[in-house]
Amino acid sequence: MTQATPASKKKRFWTMERKQSAAGWCFLTPAALLIVIFSFWPMIQAFLTSLKRGLPTRLTYCEPLWRNYERMLSDKVFIQSVTNTFTYLIIQVPIMLVLAIIFASLLNNKDLKFRGLFRTCIFLPCATGLVAYSMIFRTLFTYDGMVNAVLLGSGILSEPINWLNEPFYAKVVIIIGLIWRWTGYNMVFFLSGMQGIEYSIYEAARIDGANQFQQLTKITIPLLRPIILVTSIMSINGTLQLFDESVNLTRGGPANMTITMSHYIYNTMFTKNPNFGYAAAMSFVILIMVAVLSAIQMKVGDKR
Amino acid sequence: MREGAFSKHASRFVMYAFLIFVSLMSVFPLYWAFISAFNNTQQILGGRMIPSTHLIENLTNLFAQQDVWRAMKNSFATSLLQVVLSLAVSSIAGYGFEIYHDKYKDGVMSVIMLAMMVPFVAVLVPLFQLFSKLGLLNSWIGFFLPSLATPFLIMYFRNSARSFPKDTIEAARIDGLNEFQIFVKMFVPMMKPTYASAATITFMNAWNSYLWPKVIMQTSEATTMPMLVSNLMAGYVIDYGVVMAGVTLCSLPTIIIFFLLQKSFTNAVAGAVK
């Protein structure tokens, strides 16, 4: 190698490729920085805060450090909020995904009349805000409200159900609300996945004598596995963070029997004696739950 | 043979009946909220299914109880700002990740994708502390800053940049356009449908967001529409006509967008898995 002058060295350094690569870095840096500042950095901060106690303005490290985590184990409201959130998760997510797959496979039929209309109707709940639909459901299910009026009037019930003030029924209302709001959303994923499946596979199956149900379980579901994986991860992620419905539909009540983890964290942050350390500790537990459940999902989804 | 034809008809009837039932159930709560804006409390609780004549009365009461104009202004301003800025930041990033990709940029991208798994509540406490320190409470900037760059939008634009022809880039370079000009003059106009989809979903998310605004928009001057609607049920005596009028006003913008841009919205939703 011959000795190059600094100027020519510089010239050689800025080749076309390097210039273009640098342009790429310039383009992606603002977004990457924003994500670091508003996702990753606060995540680390949340963990540090979770080891602290005291007023929001005078946080000091706990003694022992894991004191906030220890407190959760004996905090009845926290345990209740975890139980509630997982109840919603375990009951609502499978029902919703199964319904979404059924709707999608019915709508994927090219000979179906009014296909677009059905799809629009089923997808419409997605255009509703979470607070707005919570208010609608709260009004529908209030004690002297419409649902009880209809059920009593048609003779299905002989006595009105106190939907929002009995723990079991309040959870049922939240689950109904979630299924109503999110089934169409998930259906769209499945529909778009099904459009990628060759129609001839179904024709061949039909010639071999496979009925609709067999086509669904033997062809559609196996081919949609990656999408089922994505939708279930998103649903689990979303359900673990449930907030709007708990706050507006049931107010977490009766007596915290429907409160979700996010709702309890919010309450811990904004009461008369805010405890940021404890709130951060609980939020970190949600982070770990999301990570663990997603990892399990991906493992299971990969193996099959 | 005839029996087969009959059972085929029967199963088709069942299928249509089922789909009609499901469609009605999907539409009903919204339909009912809209017509209930025309009814008074007694009619709403009684289960009246058709509009009556109380709309003006409900709206008058709503505007008397709450500063709806201010909440509308806040909601529109924050949502539109979030749409414009986050599309700008995220689309150029997605473009940068795809067009100039190398193993380092791909690495950064996978790290960014991890942020998708970070639940928003998990960063709530530090973000609230940070924003109070920066004096961004109750400000429009505070509302949209944390969600300006989202992994979803970056990935969405990165995927769409994959279909951006390399020849176009080369030709533009020969014509003397610099890299930024290629993005602005070639990519943006060509990807209008992608921008439309990203804009619809971003607007809907921003308009409907609740947890973060509830945390940082603490004064009544900073209230957004979902917060206003939520406050309508705070009293002891609830005027359900007013509540439903509020719900209707809060839902109208997103419902209108849904019907006008349904294809864009559907594409954006489904875009997450492509």
Image (spheres, rainbow, N blue to C red):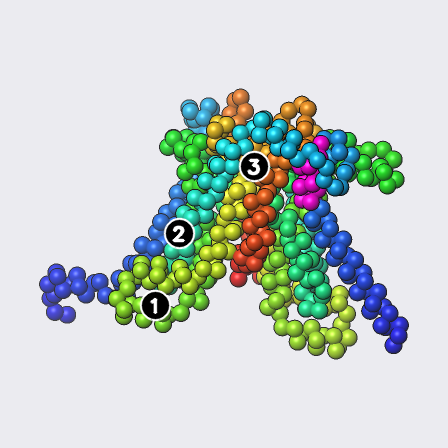
Q: Which residue is mark 1?
A: B169
Check disc 3 and give the amino acid type: Pro
Q: Residue at x 81, y 64 (%)?
A: B11
Residue A75, given in percent of the width and then of the height, sits at 61, 29
Q: Is residue A302 visible?
A: yes
Q: Residue at x 42, y 41 (%)?
A: B145
Segment colored magenta: B29-40
Q: Is residue B93 left or right of residue B54?
A: left
Q: Secondary structure at mark 3?
A: helix
Q: CA distance from mark 1 to mark 2?
A: 20 Å
Q: Which residue is mark 3?
A: B226
Q: Earlier in the sequence, mark 3 or mark 2?
A: 2
Q: Earlier in the sequence, mark 3 or mark 1?
A: 1
Q: Residue at x 65, y 38 (%)?
A: A134
Image disc number at residue B88: 2
Q: Please say whether residue B35 is one of the residues in the magenta stretch.
A: yes
